[in-house]
């Protein structure tokens, strides 16, 4: 695992496994979302935490809106 993070900033990077843990989904789902362009890698298996969480929230909101025909 990565070393402990004291402060989370816009530049905080996390691994696929760490991001999956934060979002409550599997590492495989993280990789699928990256392949689909819903999440953006900064390098192999690394993601910006803040950007990824924001993108995931937008993804969920859009999916919910499509289901309820917002």
Image (cartoon, rainbow, N blue to C red):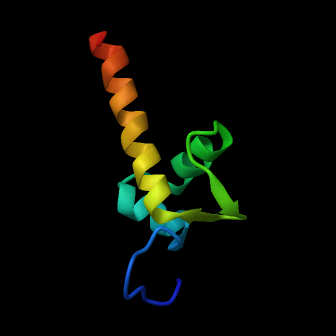
Q: Is residue 7 above or below residue 27?
A: below
Q: Residue at x 50, y 73 (%)?
A: 12
Residue 68 picture quarter: top left
Q: Is residue 40 above or below residue 7?
A: above
Q: Residue at x 66, y 64 (%)?
A: 45
Q: Nearer the viewer, residue 59 or 31?
A: 59
Residue extending furthest toward the top: 69
Q: Position of residue 52 (x, y in %)?
A: 48, 54
Residue 62 picture quarter: top left
- Indicate the quadrant containing the C terminus: top left, top right, bottom left or bottom right: top left
Q: Residue at x 32, y 20 (%)?
A: 65
Q: Is residue 38 above or below residue 1?
A: above
Please give left or right for residue 38 compared with residue 10 in the image: right
Q: Position of residue 54 (x, y in %)?
A: 41, 49
Q: Position of residue 31 (x, y in %)?
A: 61, 50
Residue extending furthest toward the right: 44
């Amino acid at each position: 695992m990565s070393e402990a993070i004291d402060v989370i900033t816009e530049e905080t990077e996390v691994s696929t496994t760490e991001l999956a843990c934060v979002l409550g989904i599997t590492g495989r789902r993280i990789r699928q979302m990256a392949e689909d362009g819903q999440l953006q890698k900064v390098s192999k298996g690394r993601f910006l935490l803040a950007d990824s969480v924001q993108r995931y929230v937008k993804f969920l909101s859009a999916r919910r809106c499509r289901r309820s025909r917002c």
